[in-house]
Amino acid sequence: MTGYRVQGLLAALVGLTISVAPALAQPRPIVIELFTSQACSSCPPADALLAELARRPDVLALGYHVTYWNGAGWTDRLSIPAATARQEAYARRFNAGQVYTPEIVVDGTGDMVGSDRDAVLAALAAARPKAIAPVQFAADRRSVAIGHGTGRGQVLLARFRRQLTTAVAGGENAGRALTDVNGVESLVTLGTWDGAPRRFSVTPPGPGDGLAVLVQASSGAILGAAAVTTAPGS
């Protein structure tokens, strides 16, 4: 009888371990999106803050360089139309359609001036990220899987440059050397996620580059996020 009791106890402990394990899973990173421009004199402090936040393991920091500053004596090397379109979509939710730089959006649900360190850190401290749509890259970085969950959203792929230093020759920052971290070079929609597991093929990041996948609800809320990076020269 003793042996049966021991086996029963072990079985109960195994069952307890299995039931507790999901609660111990690490939450997804908090997604920080900075809308900026190399031609904007107010943006370098926000760019520096983004670089600082990018070193935090609990943050996925992305820099989107908008196009509407181009032509004022300088064309931003990282500016892409997709960045402007993404900011405009956020602006319709937060600012009655008005865009500005520098702007930081935290987890798709709130915005603030990107150089307002106290406000940004407070928003980070208040964030409670949940991996509603678990995102995981394959070991070879040639595919990404979105796990089972509840909800619906778009699956976005951002390809970013981990670091780029530019000698700005015109515009409000003329004569300055600016270093941009995690500057998004392309942003595309891979597809949709409706709660059922999905897998998408991706091209691995090149040397010094990174990939980020976001699952975003129509409300703007981030449901899942993950990123992979490659060291320069690797």
Image (cartoon, rainbow, N blue to C red):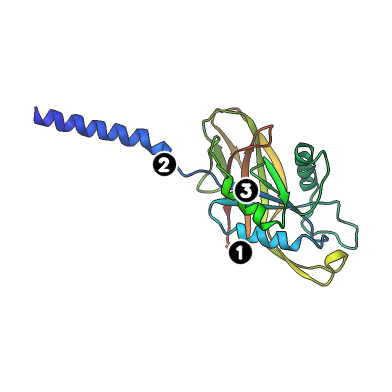
Q: Which residue has dot 2 on it?
A: 24
Say which mark, if any, is on residue 123: 3
**Distance from Cα at disc 3 to Cα at disc 1:** 32 Å
Tag 1's secondary structure? loop
Query: Where on the picture, by quarter, is residue 42?
Result: bottom right
Tag 3's secondary structure? helix
The answer to whether residue 204 of the structure is visible from this angle is no
Query: Where on the picture, by quarter, is residue 153?
Result: top right
The residue carrying pointer 2 sits among few (fewer than 14), some (14 to 19) or many (20 or more) residues within 10 Å by Cα, namely few
**Distance from Cα at disc 2 to Cα at disc 1:** 34 Å
What residue lies at 90% left-to-right and 57% top-to-bottom? 71
Amino acid type indicated by mark 3: Ala
In this rendering, the answer to whether 234 lies above or below 144 is: below
Amino acid type indicated by mark 2: Leu
In this rendering, the answer to whether 133 lies above or below 66 is: above
Residue 179, horizontal then vertical, whole percent: 71, 65
Q: How many marks?
A: 3
